Every structure is written in C-alpha cells, then in structure tokens.
C-alpha cells in the first residue's frame, strides 16, 4: 500500500496532534482523513454552486424581496 512521509515543523506537528485529539482520532487516522475530507468538501461546493445556479430563477420568483435578482451568469469566484 502506498504511503507518504510528510515533514512538519515542531509547531505544525503539535497543532496537528491537537486537532487529531480534538476530533478523537489517532494522528495517523486524522492525517489520512484530511485530504479525503477536502475532496468531499470541494465536490459538495461544486454541486451546491451548480444547484444554486440552476435554481436561481426559482429562488428569485419565490423570494422576490430577499435579494437582488440573480445575474444567472457565473462570476469570477472559484469553488
């Protein structure tokens, strides 16, 4: 099974250990889960942004006083 050796400063390692403990995970499990969690977060954000764009007109119709009407064009922001 592939593995990585990742270098951390002493301060970074202490912060990672504290974060792992706060999550109730071993250091190894915590570091393993981080990139997978980030992958899932990015997928969710992409889906949510697409969903929002696809349903912007419906939202504008349902809540006309909530915000200015959607532009219906994707802006320069990135997910």
Image (cartoon, rainbow, N blue to C red):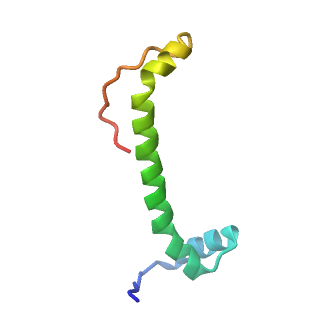
Count up the numbered dots: 0
Do we see residue 10 in this rendering?
Answer: yes
Name the residue at 67% across, 68% down.
Answer: 23
In the image, farthest residue toward the bottom: 1
Name the residue at 53% across, 71% down.
Answer: 33
- Could you tell whether 74 is left or right of 63 in the image? left
Please state which of residues 10 and 41 is positioned toward the viewer in this rendering. Answer: 41
Q: Is residue 44 above or below residue 7?
A: above
Do we see residue 12 in this rendering?
Answer: no
Name the residue at 45% across, 46% down.
Answer: 45
Q: Quadrant of the C terminus?
A: top left
Name the residue at 57% across, 78% down.
Answer: 29
Q: Is residue 23 above or below residue 1?
A: above
- Could you tell whether 61 is left or right of 15 in the image? left
Residue 22 spot, x, y in % from top left: 69, 68
Please state which of residues 8 and 36 is positioned toward the viewer in this rendering. Answer: 36
In the image, farthest residue toward the top: 65
Please state which of residues 57 and 65 is positioned toward the viewer in this rendering. Answer: 57
Residue 63 spot, x, y in % from top left: 56, 15
Q: Is residue 17 above or below residue 49?
A: below
Q: Quadrant of the N terminus?
A: bottom left
Q: Is residue 35 above or below residue 25?
A: above
């Amino acid at each position: 099974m592939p593995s990585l050796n990742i270098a951390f400063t002493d301060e970074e390692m202490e912060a990672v250990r504290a974060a792992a403990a706060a999550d109730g995970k071993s250091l190894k499990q915590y570091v393993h889960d981080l990139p997978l969690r980030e992958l899932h977060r990015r997928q969710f954000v992409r889906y949510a942004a697409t969903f929002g764009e696809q349903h912007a007109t419906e939202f504008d119709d349902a809540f006309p006083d909530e915000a200015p009407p959607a532009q219906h064009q994707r802006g320069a922001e990135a997910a």
